[in-house]
Amino acid sequence: MRKPFIAGNWKMHKTVAEARALATELRDGIGNAPHRVAVAPPFTALAGVVEALEGTGIEVAAQNMAAALEGAHTGEISASMLLDLGVKLVILGHSERRHVYGESDELINTKVLLALEQGLEVILCIGETLEERESGKLKDVVVHQIDSGLRGLDEKALGRVTIAYEPVWAIGTGKTATPDDAEEAHRIVRGRIGELYSAQAAESMIIQYGGSVKPNNVKGLMAEADIDGALVGGASLKAADFIPIARFDQ
Ligand code: PGA
């Protein structure tokens, strides 16, 4: 049985005080949820949120990480700096990093390998643009992003990777993939993991859906056989939205 995993990506929102206040509301509302729950505040609020969530089951993730261990990399944050703050997970390959900041498949792969080697868990984001979907390239794009994102990774380390399927056209647009469309993509992802690794690796891989997940559509998505969780942007910024998402089946 795969344990549902709901993660909130706060993107470039919230001061330290705002982030701590939200974390406190989440602690009270979902601190004891039966599912796996994580939040990803901006770098500046990580320490405050780690502190606010200490002793709860809610984990803290970073939204990105440098591709190098240390050195002359102005503006970057390393894996060891994240670990030093008590961060356990990092989101890599988010579509905003790929499409707005030009992160390549190779760069994302370097980050994935480095994060895992350093002891972080990874949420690897993949997903097609609207143009790619409309030109029938869904499968090619998803398979390519999995192959390149996981290149060089052995099956043991794969156990510390979650894949987030996030169709780019559904992120922040209010357009959610239908449960059927999302399920189709998730099946492609799981099938590819089976081809690259093993049936057991495919069976245990946690695959989140992301793209305009809201309290009113999470249940339908989570009812699909291959949707194991959600990566939530906009609706993770308010406790009143994120708590019912994290408690989708209660
Ligand atoms: P959204 O963002 O829920 O606001 O669409 C999802 C994401 O970018 O992870």
Image (cartoon, rainbow, N blue to C red):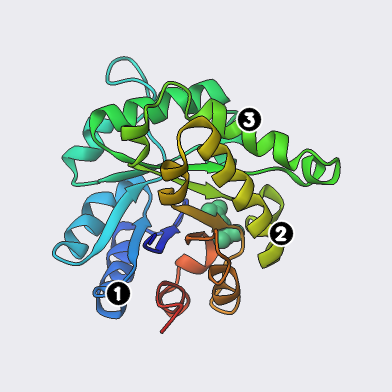
Q: Earlier in the sequence, mark 2 or mark 3?
A: 3
Q: Which is more toward the observer, 189 or 199?
A: 199
| Residue that badge 1 annotates | 33
User: CA gap, disc 1 to disc 3?
Assistant: 35 Å
Q: Is mark 3 within 8 Å of ligand 1?
A: no
**Horizontal and vertical percent position of residue 178:** 70, 66
Q: Which is more toward the observer, 50 or 189?
A: 189
Which residue is depicted at the point 34% across and 59% down? 38
Q: Quadrant of residue 214?
A: bottom right
| Residue that badge 3 annotates | 144
Seen in the picture, residue 11 relative to 224 is either above or below; the reply is above
Disc 2 and disc 3 in contact, CB within 8 angstroms: no
User: From this viewpoint, which residue is outermost toward the front?
Assistant: 199
Q: Earlier in the sequence, mark 2 or mark 1?
A: 1
Q: Is mark 2 on a helix, strand or loop?
A: helix
The type of residue carrying mark 2 is Asp
Seen in the picture, residue 17 relative to 142 is either above or below; the reply is below
Q: Which of marks 1 and 3 is nearer the N terminus?
A: 1
The type of residue carrying mark 1 is Ala
Q: Quadrant of the C terminus?
A: bottom left
Q: What element carries label 3?
A: helix
Task: Tell me if 245 is positioned left or right of 42 in this view.
Answer: right
Task: Tell me if 133 is positioned left or right of 73 in this view.
Answer: right
**Horizontal and vertical percent position of residue 189:** 58, 44
Which residue is depicted at the point 43% across and 48% down? 205
Task: Tell me if 131 is positioned left or right of 31 in this view.
Answer: right
Q: In which quarter of the image is the N terminus?
A: bottom left
User: CA gap, disc 2 to disc 1?
Assistant: 28 Å
Q: Can residue 174 be seen in this view?
A: no
Q: Does the residue labelled 2 lie within 8 Å of ligand 1?
A: no
Camera-near label (2 vs 1) is 2
